[in-house]
Amino acid sequence: MSIKLLKDNILKNAKLDNEELQTFCDAFHPKIIAKKQYLLNQGDVCKFEGFVTKGCFRVFTLDEDGKEHVLYFATKDWWITDIDSFTNQNPSFLTIQALEDSEVLLIDHADKEHLYEQIPQVEKLFRVMTQKTLVSLQRRMIANLSQTADNRYLGFIEKYPEIAQKLTNLQLASYLGISHEFLSKIRSKTASK
Amino acid sequence: MSIKLLKDNILKNAKLDNEELQTFCDAFHPKIIAKKQYLLNQGDVCKFEGFVTKGCFRVFTLDEDGKEHVLYFATKDWWITDIDSFTNQNPSFLTIQALEDSEVLLIDHADKEHLYEQIPQVEKLFRVMTQKTLVSLQRRMIANLSQTADNRYLGFIEKYPEIAQKLTNLQLASYLGISHEFLSKIRSKTASK
DNA sequence: CCAAAACATTGAACTAGTTCAATAAATGAA
DNA sequence: TTCATTTATTGAACTAGTTCAATGTTTTGG
């Protein structure tokens, strides 16, 4: 059940008692979103922070040349938002799209601010979560600076095998920062090993 | 004066009253560090979080091939640490070196934990700071996926002109993820414009 | 179940960026 | 000031990755 998933996720990063946990979870509302539908469109203000309970999303941006670049994918147990847009309520830089029929638990900006005031531990919870996200992005940054496309591909499928199998070549190539044709060549090369 | 710089930096991200501000600042200790000296060595546990008040640092990692990759540079008014190592007190992935004679204000792990308990607003302060750092790293990630080396170079010198002039080609190339020879060629090409 | 659309594969020609090597210029320590 | 070391520049040969185009394969919606 999806609220259970949220509770477990929270307890990994902060100590809330049962009552706080309940108050926290009550601030979230489930939303079902069909394959290919958008949860956020680039340019709109991001009105939510979301916790994925089913399915898979891609978070990407369109550059000036109309090319898409995937910042990350999010499956069950991941959080999704455009932090900058959500925190400062300015137009988003990112688009969030469901890759399959999915479900999320959403909290809006005012309710989250309210939670920060109501439950001091929530401040810590999101500090710790944000730190962890930052650390993994720092590692990815270094990996992108230092590794060849082959190794980034192999690293991805090793680290996220269940996500990898949900993705098309185009989507994964866009995350890796290479053309989908080249990814196809990497695949046929590494498949034989 | 360096404490003033720290106070101003904090007040950008949280509301502390004068007393809290003083308590906060008292937890920091100044350290002078000479050019080329190390503040943190890869593999050691990071015992501090630092606020730069003078000079310039590079934060980098050595990969298995012995190549250095710069995660970021930090001058006056920037924070430096290996968050993962500092937060969890495990061996650091990063090295931090002074590029010129520098000064930092340092806080150790126990004192920071103590501040979190003493001043609830500090939790928010670091949450907001970490969020901002994450947002700018997300943008850099996208820029690295979508832009050519020329544009990343031009973007850097436009965004950080005062840092750019402190760096050697080797250091900047390592941040941009290109060879220093190629940076040299980009420079001679773009200088003529 | 079929047609249309989206996706994957492959090859050929190309380009951005690397590597290596040689030389010049700048910096630093004595 | 000098010598040694580090840094920057440039060119030539190379390689990783792109682009374009053609063909085959899978998915999707009606």
Image (spheres, coloured by chain):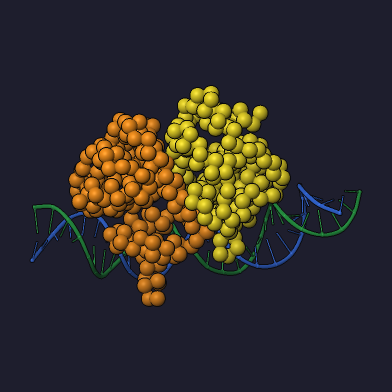
Chain colours: A yellow, B orange, C green, D blue
At a point 36% along the width and 50% down the height, the residue shown is B12
Left or right position of D21 against A11: right
Looking at the rendered image, the quarter that the C terminus of chain B falls into is bottom left
Any part of residue A113 in sight: yes
Say which of A126 and B137 sits in front.
A126
Image quadrant assignment for residue C20:
bottom left
Left or right position of B157 against B4: right
Task: Pinpoint residue A177: horizontal percent, then vertical percent.
Answer: 54, 54
At a point 48% along the width and 57% down the height, the residue shown is B143
Image quadrant assignment for residue A62:
bottom right
Task: Pinpoint residue A179: horizontal percent, then vertical percent.
Answer: 59, 56
Task: Pinpoint residue B139: horizontal percent, then vertical percent.
Answer: 48, 54
Q: Reply above or below: C19 against B112.
A: below
Number of callouts in the render? 0
Any part of residue B64 in sight: no
Q: Reply above or below: B88 against B103.
A: above
Say which of B189 and B17 sits in front.
B17
